[in-house]
Image (spheres, rainbow, N blue to C red):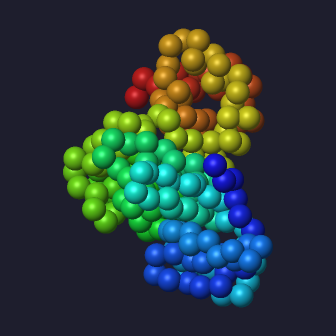
Amino acid sequence: MYSYIKGLVTEIDSNYVVIENNGIGYIIYTANPYQFEENKEYQIYLYQYVREDEISLYGFENIKEKELFLKLISVKGLGCKMALPIIATGSIDGIIDAIERENILYLKKFPKIGEKVARQIILDLKGKLVSSNNDNTNDNKFEELTEVLKGLGYKNQDIKRILPSINASDDIEMQIKEALKLMLK
């Protein structure tokens, strides 16, 4: 399994780029090949897809894209060729938010994604994805509050939903009171 490749982009196609590394040109399917420039060096994170009749490399600009791609291809009925356009046409946070909020209409806007596949994506991934920046900072600020609410039996996704509405500068007792009020709404 490959983690990443560093090399010079020597060719750009509508579906892939060719990266030259140590005299070998690798075809790497990417979500948006035109984000790269020819004759410029890049580091691309890789996923190697292996089947009995095919070996392909899929490339991503950053780890977040790769992780979301790996989660998407774990969904029943969703392969690499269907997951890559989702990464290309949607923002990572937007896709995660749509899955967490069960927004089928948002997911259906992607190529080849119908109602059945959109529902399967939500069924398989809801609660398993973490949004990038906001959740990490909220988790640090509200770590004690989160533990108290979990101890009271609340689910992680419900806790994350209310955290943005709570004042981080309040003491823990005020945070708990406010959180319980929001949970009851």
**Is residue 30 positioned above or below 165 on the image?**
below
Work out which residue is located at the far front of the displayed protein and give it. 52
Residue 44 lies, in percent from the top left, at 67, 65
The image quarter in which residue 165 lies: top right
Work out which residue is located at the far left of the displayed protein and give it. 115
Query: Measuring 58% from the left and 35% from the top, which residue is drawn there?
Result: 163
**Is residue 61 positioned above or below 66 on the image?**
below
Q: In the drawing, does residue 162 fall left or right of residue 124?
A: right
Residue in the foreground of this view, choosing between 7 and 124: 7
Residue 37 lies, in percent from the top left, at 65, 85
Residue 70 lies, in percent from the top left, at 51, 48
The image quarter in which residue 143 lies: top right
Query: Measuring 75% from the left and 68% from the top, which residue is drawn there?
Result: 6
Residue 5 lies, in percent from the top left, at 71, 64
Residue 41 shows in the view: yes
Query: Measuring 64% from the left and 76% from the top, which residue is drawn there?
Result: 25
Residue in the foreground of this view, choosing between 125 and 17: 17
Image quarter of the C terminus = top left
Residue in the foreground of this view, choosing between 185 and 86: 86
Query: Measuring 34% from the left and 63% from the top, which residue is drawn there?
Result: 110
Q: In the drawing, does residue 1 fall left or right of residue 185?
A: right
Work out which residue is located at the far bottom of the displayed protein and give it. 39
**Is residue 1 positioned above or below 37 on the image?**
above
**Is residue 134 positioned above or below 111 on the image?**
above
Q: In the drawing, does residue 176 fall left or right of residue 13?
A: right
Count the numbered circles shown. Answer: 0
Work out which residue is located at the far top of the displayed protein and give it. 152
Residue in the foreground of this view, choosing between 3 and 172: 3
Residue 101 shows in the view: no
